[in-house]
Amino acid sequence: MKIKDFAKKYQIQADTIRYYEKENILKPKRRENGYREYDEECEKQLQLIIILKQLGFTIKEIQQLLILRDESISTECNNATVVLLKQKIMKLEERIQFYQQALKVVQTVEELVNEEKYLENKAVIEELLLVFFKSVHKREI
């Protein structure tokens, strides 16, 4: 499959695919004429990259995982993988907590503005949003 078709199939830009190649996380075969050929292995690789990106992995982390995946199994390799995955688990748990808290805030605001009660509850809504802002930014500091 050519890059245009490959990009269209996965709804990403061809430049993104070229970037993944440049970063050495996607390695298509080359035809005799120099054109890239995206085969089933490339598809599996891109699917892995897409899901890891959706999980919040950076390109550098994906590179590290792919290097570890291609190394022979060893205690050192296993430990490095576990450390990376534990870090990602912690970040995902933080994001889940943030979204759970955000959902509660939005649901509360929705209840407070329901039936045209915004003006009546304006101060409460502003305070709720301010408290949420402070709780989110306290973690980032």
Image: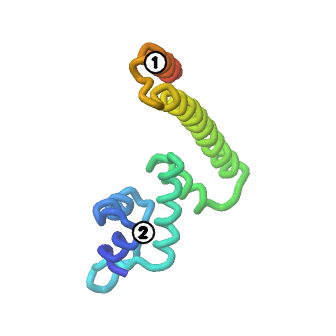
Q: Is residue 121 above or below residue 94?
A: above
Who's the residue at 57% across and 31% down the image? 104
Name the residue nearer the viewer: 83 or 46: 46
Q: Nearer the viewer, residue 138 or 112?
A: 112
Q: Residues within 10 Å of mark 1 (few under 14, many from 20)?
A: some
Secondary structure under tag 1 reads helix
Looking at the figure, which quarter contains the N terminus? bottom left
Kindly identify the amino acid type of the residue bearing the numbered disc 1.
Asn
Q: Position of residue 140 (x, y in %)?
A: 48, 23
Q: Nearer the viewer, residue 120 or 73?
A: 120
How crowded pointer 2 is (Cα within 10 Å; few <14, some 14-19, many 20+) is rated as some
- Label disc, if present, on residue 91 of the rendered structure: none
Q: Residue at 31% across / 63% down in the picture?
A: 13
Identify the residue under disc 2.
Answer: 27
Residue 55 placement, left or right of 75 = left
Coordinates of residue 88 in the picture (x, y in percent)? 59, 42
**Secondary element type, mark 2:** loop
- Give residue 39's position: percent from left, percent from top: 45, 79
51 w.r.t. 38: above or below: above
- Pick the residue in front: 26 or 79: 26
Amino acid type at circle 2 is Lys
Residue at x 40% of width, y 77% of height: 38
Residue ranking furthest to the bottom: 32
Q: Earlier in the sequence, mark 1 or mark 2?
A: 2
Q: Residue pushed farthest front?
A: 115
Instruction: Report the number of numbered marks.
Output: 2
Residue 121, label in figure:
1
Q: Residue furthest right?
A: 75
